Amino acid sequence: MNAQHFDALEARDPTVREAALMAALPGVIRHAQQHAPAFAASLAGIDAASVCSRSALAALPVVRKSELHELQRQSRRAGRDPFGGHATIGWRALGTLRRAQRVYQSPGPIYEPEGLAPDYWRLARAMHAAGLRAGDLVHNCFSYHLTPGGLMMESGALALGCTVFPGGVGNTELQLQAIDDLRPDAYIGTPSFLKILVEKAAETGTDMACMTKALVGGEAFPPSLRDWLAERGIQAYQSYATADLGLVAYETPAREGLVLDEGVIAEIVRPGTGEPVADGEVGEVVVTTLNPDYPMVRFGTGDLSAVLPGPCPSGRTNTRIKGWLGRADQTAKVRGMFVHASQVAAVVKRHPEISRARLVVEGEMANDRMTLHAEVAQGAASEGLAERLAQSLRDVTKLRGEIALAQPGELPNDGKVIEDARSYR
């Protein structure tokens, strides 16, 4: 094993990894059916033993983050648990036998449990790839209030053998005083707050030369900011993690995309559907975790990304993704009616000749025009296809629209299913 790897799992033969993930999948499905009421309902009638391949997994419903808030709200109003029936842990009043260590409230509100396992969110792997090592002092600037960010990162740092300063967010002057006094090795937090600290340090004459490593997340991390930090002596790497899933993917010193975590099964699906797209095509990140406490099965993150070809030059053999490429939960209001990505998918599903489609909304407010651009394979455009598509569009959305047929590959590969190109001036 490469000494720079967190463990031997990172360098496994991809076929060995895939076999292990697929062997574990039926147990995840069975456990969710037996102990998480929401999955008992959504996966009713599914033979867990048969879900042992990616094609079988792709046939299961997607639980989207955008829907989780409403599912939890309905559950609470009905007097059931605040996790919407998706967790297998809790506390005495919920009637669960397995105890949650903490419960968090993320914006929405969405509630998330934390189990008892050390490094519950598996962040130590991302920290190791970012160069953090046992004995480092880590300045943690994720929030410790209500949301899990601070403790997510802290648990990973402690598992790695680091010492943690719980800085939290804000209080720039006090943060800089602690950096000056304690001389931390590494920063954890959002990239924008790290930039604020560095700029304020330069303004006040505070020495931050001790801080040479960083793991950032929670927002976009453009190459320009990465390079700006590197010029000031800080090598910062991205982590892609959520409160629901833990670590999904992480950046390595190769700086070529993000490597998937060993504890997840990730798919890239067409927005508004649960259908996997071809490698390289932009779509929504859907993740199944191997976490028995919060066994999210096909959890739609709402984030867009795409699979990168080939292995990581760092020697890690898991699949790589491009990183965050935008949001998948696209909606537009047209002539007073909401149009969703799932409706565009429903139109496409009625016409097997169509491989991809993009609904473009144009014009000025109160004078909306929408056009469905649809890719059709050469020779597959039968007579009257455009008229039939227009009728399907009207049936599904209750709105009239134009149809523009296109050749395969003509539509942009950016994951957009609905493009709002209206002028709001």
Image (cartoon, helix red, strand yellow):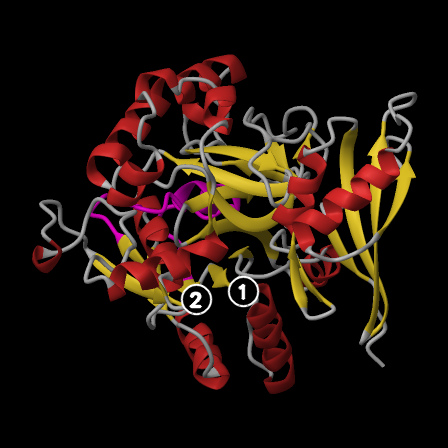
Q: Could you tell whether 82 is left or right of 402 in the image?
A: left
First in sequence, mark 2 or 1: give its number. Answer: 2
398 to the left or right of 34:
right
Asked if the residues shown at circle 2 and circle 1 are in contact, with their CB atoms under 8 angstroms apart, the answer is yes
Report whether residue 181 is seen. Answer: yes
The magenta stretch is: 114-138
Q: Amino acid at mark 2?
A: Phe
Q: Main secondary structure of the magenta part?
A: loop
Q: Secondary structure at mark 1?
A: loop
Asked if 187 appears above or below 402 in the picture, the reply is below
Give the quarter of the image for residue 380. Answer: top right
Residue 190, disc = 1
Residue 256 image position (x, y, % from top left): 68, 38
Work out whether residue 20 or residue 310 is closer to the camera in this orientation and state it. Answer: 20
Q: Which residue is mark 2?
A: 142
Q: Indicate yes or no whether the magenta region holds residue 365.
A: no
